[in-house]
Image: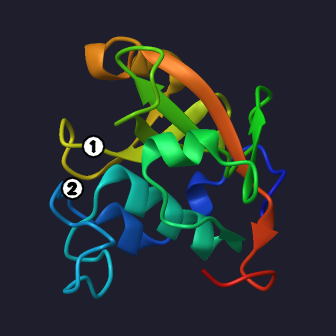
């Protein structure tokens, strides 16, 4: 499990690069059978963490930001930390990305349509991502808990 390597992008399986953005594809949906047919930013990020052995409940952005049971807030980012971006300093509706190393993050957005890796500075170029609220690190591995 590459938790402290400089860059996890080469280790991301092809299937994650093919998942289309779909805001309606919500984990609370009774028909959701996986994210391969579409996902929002949160579901994409949580599934990517699970692939690498980390576990976070399917929180909404503001719940993720407020959580202290499953995650901790960090300001020195490591690969697999969740990053929250917002147009304001409010976590409600914030965009969730996953730090991949080298000051970059992978995310699934409506703007791009498929997963993309951006330098952290690039997020600030867009009004909806201009504020980096900070990072959250998963406290548990897949074997620690099931949600």
Residue 42, located in which quarter of the rendered image? Answer: bottom left
Q: Residue at x 57, y 37 (%)?
A: 83
Residue 1, located in which quarter of the rendered image? Answer: bottom right
Q: Residue at x 19, y 35 (%)?
A: 111
Q: Measure the C-alpha gap from mark 2 to mark 1.
A: 6 Å
In the image, taking residue 54 as reference, residue 19 lies left or right, namely left
Q: Residue at x 59, y 74 (%)?
A: 51
Number of marks: 2
Q: Which mark is residue 139?
A: none
* Badge 2 element: loop
Label 1 sits on residue: 109
Q: Which mark is residue 21?
A: 2
Estimate the x, y position of residue 126 in percent, counting from the top left.
29, 16
Estimate the x, y position of residue 35 in percent, counting from the top left.
31, 74
In front: 97, or 94?
94
Please report contact status of discs 2 and 1: CB closer than 8 Å, yes or no: yes
Q: Residue at x 56, y 67 (%)?
A: 57
Mark 2 residue crowding within 10 angstroms, few (<14) / some (14–19) / many (20+): many
Q: Earlier in the sequence, mark 2 or mark 1?
A: 2
* Badge 1 element: loop
């Amino acid at each position: 499990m590459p938790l402290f390597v400089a860059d996890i992008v080469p280790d991301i399986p092809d299937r994650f690069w093919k998942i289309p953005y779909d805001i309606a594809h919500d984990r609370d949906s009774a028909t959701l059978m996986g994210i391969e047919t579409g996902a929002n930013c949160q579901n994409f990020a949580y599934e990517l963490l699970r692939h690498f052995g980390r576990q976070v409940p399917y929180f909404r952005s503001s719940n993720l930001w407020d959580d202290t049971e499953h995650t901790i807030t960090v300001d020195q980012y490591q690969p697999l930390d969740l990053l929250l971006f917002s147009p304001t300093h409010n976590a409600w509706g914030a965009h969730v990305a996953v730090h991949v190393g080298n000051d970059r993050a992978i995310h699934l957005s409506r703007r791009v349509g498929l997963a993309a890796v951006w330098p952290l500075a690039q997020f600030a170029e867009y009004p909806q991502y201009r504020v980096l609220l900070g990072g959250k690190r998963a406290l548990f591995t897949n074997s620690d808990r099931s949600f």
